[in-house]
Image: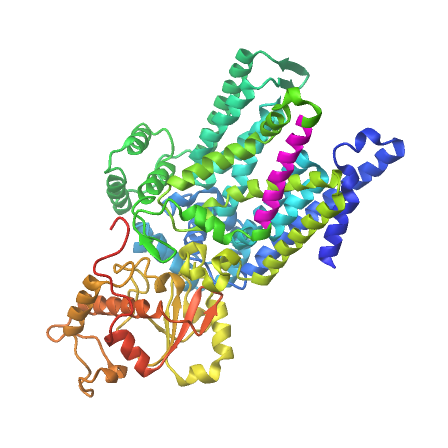
Amino acid sequence: MRLALLLGVEIAVARTAPGYVSRADGKSKQALLANAGFVWLVAILLSIFHGALAITASMEKSPTYDEPAHLTAGYSYWLRNDFRLDPENGNLQARWAALPLLFTRPNFPEFNNPEWKQADGGRLSDQFFYDVGNNSDCLLLQSRTMIALFSASLCLLIFVCAKQLFGAIGGLISESIAVFDPNLLAHGALVTSDTMAAFFFLAAGWSCWQLLHRLTARRFAISALSIAGLFLTKMSASLFLLVAGILAIVSVASRESITIQIGRFAQIVVNRWHKSALVIGSLITIGAIVVLTIWTAFSFRFSPFTETGRVRELWNARWDLLLADNGPAEKVIGFARTHRLLPEAFLYGLAFVHHNESNRPAFLDNQWSVVGFHSFFPRAFLYKTPLPLLGLFALGLWTAFTRSQQHQETSPRSRWEIPGRDLLRLTPLWSLALIYGGCSLASRLNIGHRHILPLYPVLFIACGACAQLVYRKHKGIAAAVVAILLLWHIGESFAIRPDYLAYFNQVAGGASHGYKHVVDSSLDWGQDLPALKMWLDAQQPAVNRKPLYLAYFGKGHPRWYGIDAEILPEKHLFPETASVPFKAGFYCLSATILQSVYSPEIGPWCRPYEAAYQTALAHTQLDDETTLNPSSHARWIAKPQATPSIENIKEFERLRLSRLCAYLRHRQPAAEIGHSILVFDLDTAELDRALYGSPPELESEVCVRGY
């Protein structure tokens, strides 16, 4: 019924499209106003529905890897006016997400503990969520609701932009696509900067372009606030400087005038030199407001913290590491730090992101790299974008092309008039896509498809061009094609719900094959502990008879969700875990761990890894009650033959887990929990083959790009 109503609404408001007004009489104009109000009501309801879809799906998920750190930092900003935690991930989104906590007042770890003094955001967030008496589910519900408001606002903004370009039907088509898009829903209620960055990139580009055509106090304020919000949300906001440069050049070079209307003062600027002066002056003023806003967000204080001592020593040491390369970016940031041009926490965030965008492990299509893949984002886009969305986008491009062809037939002398006019109107969209997409290709930070989320609103809006088909010949066929693609898109969304983060289209083989293409925040971000608990309860008789092991990539606590499993140690995860003997049973592995992305033994299993494993194996011994028969591994205990060494034990356990993962990568899982946690049911014989038999993969050397 909802789908039928949506399609009915889109047909009912067809009269609000461009071209209808000129034929309207007085009564028709009144009907037009009524329809316009109805269109806005539908648009608002659609955005609210999107927010509801996002928040209800997210509450079936455990905290993703970054959420606890973001929320803990945001709450500390409000409580202490201190910015030592998580400065690299934006001030605004953390503060915004933590706003409800100022009313519910959850407990915060003591400010005199070592973790606070050392600015250890990871351990502090772990304490905040699980150790000081708070309900982590309630914390997530409050903060995720705040982010869902921005996601709903983004859908409404997409409607506004598409409506201005393609009319009411175009606006509703674009918004409908956004409302049900799995990628936007996946991040629409997560306490991260991705959704807010997508909102502010679009808002900043669109409002800036509007300002460069008609300069009013209202448009100036909206543009300045949008750009300032972007810089306080995401460190990649510096890319918008290039977008603003393109907008300014196109505005000045075009034949269109700039209207100034401030109060009673009104003037039309046509001369290009005068336009240049006006545009440059406006952008410089906005830049000054952005800098002032950044200082305001950090309380007009250069230092992130008020005290000195250990935390200052740690920050200085970190600064030395971040600026050690002494490249152009490091020199600019170092200069700004020396002369205190911006708050130190903001500059630290810029330096941190720049330093860590290279030499970061990445996985793509059964390949591993420590320097990234140039094809990562194009392939991730191809795998995770719904095919009907790509179809609607292609239909929109075809609409624009045929529109130009039809105009050439009637006016052959003005061959480029329509394409030029259309490109001019679409400047904020193609400039954002060009700059952001181009920089994504050069990025080595290949940890998540989410980093190109700001490109999707451009895609959604462009699909609104399909509305123009309604006013041509064979409009019935065209409307049917658009409706079928929309229904397919909506069906894809509901089919994957609530596992939006694990969405993969048919090109990738669907969600069940996603872990073979990309992992980390593109698929597995630690979000499926509740789903694992539900699966274990459903399989209770079998699970109760066998040991349960969990190698989990995330920051949630399995036991908080009632999961009683042996936690397999992994680098930087659960370092306090004691040695765990492997027995026949259920092995639940996060996809990121299965692909050994962040293990020192990154990539496919190879002879150097096997040699290290055999050496570690030789330095361990069986429990006194066992024999040297490998099939007795059920009582295997990793411990050195001579003096006990925690380092040796951890090395053996890490290598043992990596070898097990190398074996399981060639085995079909018994179940996929949310498509991010893979469950393997191993008997004694198979576990023997995995740990002691010939490895199913054994390269001659380490096969990792840039290793």
Location of the N terminus by quadrant is bottom right
- Report the residue at 38% width, 31% height from top: 342
Identify the main secondary structure in magenta: helix
Q: Which residues are magenta?
A: 389-408
Across and down, in percent, residue 391 comes to 59, 48
Q: Position of residue 39 (x, y in %)?
A: 74, 43
Location of residue 665 by image quarter = bottom left
- Residue 68 is situated, as x and y percent measured from the top left of the image, at 43, 56
Way the structure is coloured: rainbow
Q: Is residue 297 visible?
A: no
* Residue found at x 23% / y 57%: 702
217 with respect to 679 (left or right) = right
The answer to which of 406 and 611 lies nearer the viewer is 406
| Quadrant housing residue 163 | top right
| Residue 237 at least partly seen | yes
Residue furthest to the bottom in view is: 625
Q: Is residue 439 above or below residue 387?
A: above
Q: Is residue 525 above or below residue 279?
A: below
Compared to residue 407, the image places residue 500 above or below, namely below
Please tell me whether residue 392 belongs to the stretch shown in magenta.
yes
The foreground one among 58 and 519 is 519
Image point (54%, 44%), residue name: 456
